[in-house]
């Protein structure tokens, strides 16, 4: 399936049905009085987060979504029927904005979350609604209220605990294959990965986290070069970044210079993303002669002036992965947002819950 993480759609809620002006007319019942019913409510448009979806491709081709209008009122005290609401299913992690004002409307961060996007119009009043002791034969009625219409911009940001970044062919896809259930395409040419891949990593019984593999970054990515810049937004919700570095580049390039280039592109793209906790994964050490590995790693750490954790691994040979996985899980578990308090069944309205702010310890 083609991965699509942006779409623009038009939505329109249904208009309310018009009220009816009618009077009771039956044999032997003079002055029967008004009996025109109110119109029905128009259908509303909702969005719901569906854990089974991982792309916005449905909205790339279906751009117009309209709810039905409510039925008009009728005589004999008959109110018009309300129209059915329509529900747009979107992947978890979708951000919904007003395309004209860029106002944030909703963020679908939990499976099953349902958000109102456009409210249907209320039905109009029939003349039965205006009956009173001083107005026994009302001839007033009102039309239905119009439903809301909006142009929306949808943006998908995958929900992952850990994000992988690095140059093309740094070994990110091999790494995610080695530690998770993801099976991305792996080849020996740059830009094999064309869209984000998610994998669940098992660190033990009831111990797991989600990792995202993105297309590789190159110099100038913040200005739109390469493919990685298209998907950097998917790293903004992660709790930890793993910077995968090729310690044995086939072209003889300097790993330190390559790593600094990626860090600079990250900072140019988004300062908040740059300040996220970031660990180095020094990969492909199986291709470095054993007598040179320790010296090469020490040289890398010294020149990068690195104080945060780093790991020496070989994703292909699956060496050094378990300590890394355990350390990542401990970090992710320590920085998970606290669960919201359970609702008191004695009250209908949920208590206000302050948004949890994650500390930035990067």
Image (spheres, rainbow, N blue to C red):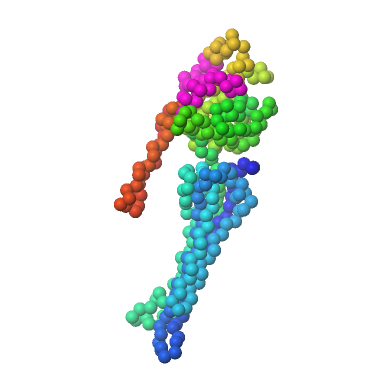
Q: Quadrant of residue 248?
A: top right
Report the quarter where the N terminus lies: top right
Q: Quadrant of residue 221?
A: top right
Horizontally, is 253 left or right of 325 in the view? right
Q: Is residue 200 visible?
A: yes
Q: Is residue 97 above or below residue 85?
A: above
Which residue corresponds to the image point at 54% horizontal and 26% vertical from the top-left? 243
Residue 307 among magenta residues: yes
Q: Position of residue 302 (x, y in %)?
A: 52, 15
Report the quarter where the C terminus lies: top left
Q: Position of residue 267 (x, y in %)?
A: 53, 30
Q: Is residue 148 above or below residue 101?
A: below
Residue 308 among magenta residues: yes
Q: Is residue 21 visible?
A: no
Q: Is residue 78 above or below residue 307?
A: below
Which residue corresponds to the image point at 35% horizontal and 44% vertical from the top-left? 342
Residue closest to the far bottom: 28
Q: Position of residue 151 (x, y in %)?
A: 56, 54
Q: Position of residue 274 (x, y in %)?
A: 51, 30
- Over which residues does the magenta segment extend? 300-329
Residue closest to the far left: 346
Which residue corresponds to the image point at 58% horizontal and 44% vertical from the top-left? 55
From the viewer's side, name the closer residue of 315 and 299: 315
Which residue corresponds to the image point at 52% horizontal and 44% vertical from the top-left? 51
């Amino acid at each position: 399936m083609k991965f699509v993480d942006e779409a623009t759609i038009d939505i329109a809620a249904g208009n309310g049905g018009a009220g009816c002006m009618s009077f009771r007319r039956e044999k032997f019942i003079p002055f029967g009085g008004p009996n025109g019913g109110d119109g029905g409510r128009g259908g509303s448009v909702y969005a719901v987060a569906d854990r089974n979806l991982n792309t916005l491709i449905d909205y790339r081709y279906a751009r117009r979504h309209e709810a039905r209008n409510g039925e008009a009122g009728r005589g004999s005290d008959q109110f018009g029927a309300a129209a059915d609401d329509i529900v747009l299913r979107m992947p978890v992690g979708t951000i919904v904005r007003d395309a004209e004002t860029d106002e944030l409307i909703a963020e679908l961060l939990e499976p099953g979350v349902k958000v109102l996007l456009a409210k249907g119009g209320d039905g109009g009043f029939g003349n039965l609604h205006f009956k009173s002791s001083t107005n026994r034969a009302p001839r007033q009625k009102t039309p239905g209220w119009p439903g809301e219409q909006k142009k929306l911009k949808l943006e998908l940001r995958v929900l992952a605990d850990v994000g992988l970044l690095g140059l093309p062919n740094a070994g990110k896809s091999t790494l995610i294959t080695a530690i998770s259930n993801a099976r991305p395409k792996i080849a020996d040419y740059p830009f094999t990965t064309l869209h984000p891949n998610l994998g669940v990593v098992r660190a033990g019984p009831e111990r797991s986290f989600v990792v995202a593999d993105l297309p590789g970054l190159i110099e100038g990515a913040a200005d739109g070069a390469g493919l990685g810049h298209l998907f950097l937004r998917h790293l903004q919700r992660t709790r930890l970044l793993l910077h995968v570095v090729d310690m044995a580049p086939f072209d003889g390039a300097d790993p330190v210079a390559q790593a600094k280039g990626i860090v600079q592109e990250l900072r140019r793209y988004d300062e908040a993303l740059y300040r996220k906790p970031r660990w180095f994964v020094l990969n492909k050490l199986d291709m470095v002669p054993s007598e040179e590995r320790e010296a090469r790693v020490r040289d890398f750490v010294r020149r990068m002036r690195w104080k945060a954790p780093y790991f020496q691994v070989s994703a292909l040979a699956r060496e050094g992965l378990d300590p890394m996985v355990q350390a990542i899980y401990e970090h992710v578990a320590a920085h998970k947002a606290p669960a919201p308090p359970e609702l008191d069944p004695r009250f209908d309205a949920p208590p206000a819950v302050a948004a949890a702010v994650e500390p930035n310890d990067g």
